[in-house]
Image (cartoon, rainbow, N blue to C red):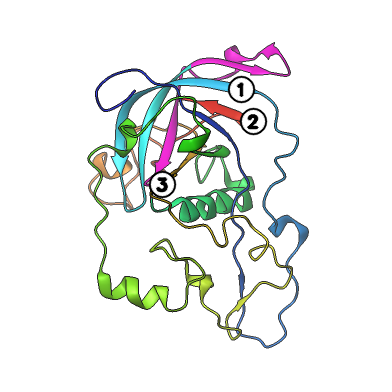
């Protein structure tokens, strides 16, 4: 849906996440394991079609929406019945696709905790405006979003960041004393030198499990047991596929 309430279709494809450097104060840290790499998406198959419902919340770099599952196919088979009726999509704000790609990598690294300590993660999807069949300049998830930044912080970050963007990350610092990219997983990532383009913006989305109400609204003190049926994590998302329409 566009900001003028005219329905539009946006097609996104499965995209690699953005691995981090390891942190180690030693001069000769051990190499990271194979699982440190971004998850392989070459075998991703399927299409998920969803329709946005309502905005759930907004943070520094993204905005979350609930979405209704319209259809899902995998290898030409209808798998819609295997999915919940509604899911959650976290859209990055235009400037912060690198950060969202890094968040996707953390979900991959915490795979064993999904469904218990954190929400289920189903995939990371992205595309650019130029790859769309229509013109989504008024894409609803980006409507009325502000990007408050400290100019002094921007100047400081840009002095050492490999990207000309406020979307810099702590391990962009060229400091061999702390951050180590021993296997070049970060260096070789397509996100390492990504920066926001005003001419061709990137749309990036995390697909996650749709959870319930915020826990902080259910009990006054965090050490008090929540009422039955309330989960201790407030997050949301979807189904791993090679493309995602919303």
Q: Residue at x 54, y 28 (%)?
A: 244
Query: Residues at badges 3 and 1 in contact (C-beta under 8 Å)?
Result: no
Which of marks 1 and 3 precedes in the sequence?
Answer: 1
> What is the number of the mark on residue 231?
none
Q: Position of residue 16 (x, y in %)?
A: 63, 47
| Label 2 CA crowd tier, 10 Å (few <14, some 14–19, many 20+) | many
Q: Residue at x 55, y 62 (%)?
A: 193
Which of marks 2 and 1 precedes in the sequence?
Answer: 1
* Distance between the alpha carbons at the discs numbered 3 and 1: 28 Å
What secondary structure is found at the residue carrying circle 2? loop
Front disc: 3 or 1: 3
Q: Is residue 50 left or right of residue 65?
A: right
Q: Which residues are magenta?
A: 70-94
Q: Position of residue 7 (x, y in %)?
A: 35, 18
Q: Nearer the viewer, residue 79 or 214?
A: 79
* Distance between the alpha carbons at the discs numbered 3 and 2: 25 Å
What secondary structure is found at the residue carrying circle 1? strand
Quadrant for the C terminus in the image: top left
User: Is 87 in the magenta?
Assistant: yes
Q: Image height check: is 237 above or below 188? A: above
Give the residue pinned by disc 3.
Answer: 199
Q: Position of residue 179 (x, y in %)?
A: 59, 77
> What is the number of the mark on residue 47?
1
Q: Image height check: is 25 above or below 66? A: below
Q: Is residue 22 left or right of residue 5?
A: right
Residue 31: quadrant of the picture: bottom right
Quadrant for the N terminus in the image: top left
Q: Residue at x 41, y 24 (%)?
A: 67
Which of marks 2 and 3 precedes in the sequence?
Answer: 3
| Label 1 CA crowd tier, 10 Å (few <14, some 14–19, many 20+) | many
> What is the number of the mark on residue 242?
2
């Amino acid at each position: 849906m566009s900001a003028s309430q005219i329905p539009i279709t946006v097609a996104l494809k499965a995209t690699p996440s953005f691995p981090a450097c390891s942190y180690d104060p030693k001069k000769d840290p051990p190499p990271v394991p194979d699982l440190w790499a971004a998850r392989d998406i070459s075998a991703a198959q399927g299409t998920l079609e969803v329709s946005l419902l309502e905005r759930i919340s907004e943070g520094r770099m993204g905005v979350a929406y609930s979405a209704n599952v319209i259809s899902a196919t995998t290898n030409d088979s209808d798998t819609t019945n295997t999915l919940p009726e509604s899911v959650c999509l976290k859209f990055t704000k235009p400037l912060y696709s690198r950060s969202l790609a890094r968040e996707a990598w953390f979900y991959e690294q915490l795979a064993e905790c999904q469904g218990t300590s954190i929400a289920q993660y189903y995939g990371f999807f992205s595309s650019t405006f130029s790859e769309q069949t229509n013109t989504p300049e008024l894409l609803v998830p980006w409507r009325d979003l502000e990007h408050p930044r400290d100019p002094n912080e921007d100047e400081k970050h840009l002095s050492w960041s490999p990207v000309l963007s406020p979307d810099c990350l702590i391990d962009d610092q060229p400091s061999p004393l702390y951050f180590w990219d021993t296997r070049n997983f970060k260096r070789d990532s397509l996100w390492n030198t990504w920066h926001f383009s005003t001419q061709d913006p990137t749309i990036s989305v995390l697909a996650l499990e749709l959870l319930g109400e915020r826990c902080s609204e259910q009990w006054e003190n965090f050490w008090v047991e929540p009422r039955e049926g309330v989960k201790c994590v407030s997050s949301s998302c979807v189904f791993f596929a090679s493309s995602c329409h919303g």
